[in-house]
Amino acid sequence: MRRNVLRKSIIAALFFVAFASAFAAKTYISEAKLSTLYTIDGSHVIKTMNHQDLDLYLDSVRIAGVKAIDMCALLNNNDENYYHDKALRNGNLVAPLTTNGSAFADAVQYDYWDNIVYVVRECWKRGIYVKISPLGPDIYNNVQPNKGMVRIYINLLCRLLEKEVNIVWRINQSIMGPQAAELSEEMVSAIKVHNKKQLIVFE
């Protein structure tokens, strides 16, 4: 009798843990919660690490208590990742270099943007949020994108990341120049269209 009760208790406890984990995995973070997380700068991760090194790096920072990583999706218009996949076609912000498919084993399919999704998902496997800046300061200074260019680019990025619950969008108006209000508005509009639950923070 006691064994049956104990067995049922264990099963119930395991079910509760599984249910809680599943619920947590679908929960988007709030700004109040985000402010309490141990965050590090990981912009180099996208550019300089292969998958094996990334796994080791993320395991180490998770053990160290890191709960969020700052990243920039595109630092400059000549950006490429460890595998020499270029982000843009001829450095053109409105021509992101994308391919059909995303299989890592196929070098023709796997592109710069697939790698960003991979990084984001590997972070979430370890319970790490990704605070992502759509564009780096070099883009605003050298390319000087207008509203239309930003609209095309941000919609691509939003479509890629619309299902990722660990995404936090960082909108840094201080690096955008005189069109900061218009460009940030364009970004926010696109983000809200693709996933209203993803948190947006202004810096």
Image (cartoon, rainbow, N blue to C red):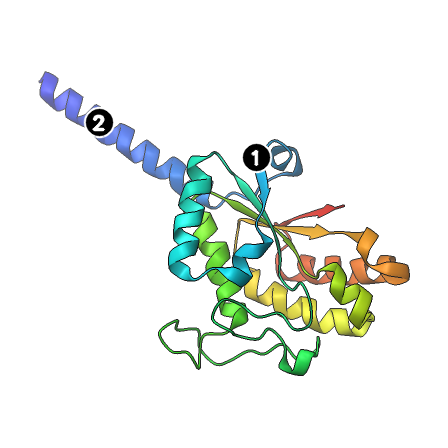
Q: Is residue 163 visible?
A: no
Residue in front for this viewpoint, 191 or 37: 37
* In the image: residue 167, left or right of residue 118: right
Q: Which residue is mark 1?
A: 38
Residue in front for this viewpoint, 181 or 42: 42
Residue in front for this viewpoint, 58 or 12: 58
Mark 1 in CB contact with mark 2 (< 8 angstroms)? no
Q: Which mark is residue 10?
A: 2
Image quarter for residue 102? bottom left
Q: Which mark is residue 84?
A: none
Residue 40's spot in the image, x, y percent? Answer: 58, 42
Q: Is residue 110 visible?
A: yes
Please name the amino acid that badge 2 sits on: Ile
In terms of sequence position, does the residue under pointer 1 or pointer 2 come before the other?
A: 2
117 above or below 8?
below
Image quarter for residue 93? bottom right
Task: Check the image and name the residue furthest to the right.
Answer: 178
Q: Residues within 10 Å of mark 2 (few under 14, many from 20)?
A: few
Residue 158's spot in the image, x, y percent? Answer: 62, 63
State how far apart marks 1 and 2 are (Cα). Answer: 33 Å
Q: Quadrant of the C terminus?
A: top right
Residue at 70%, 63% (x, y): give it: 190
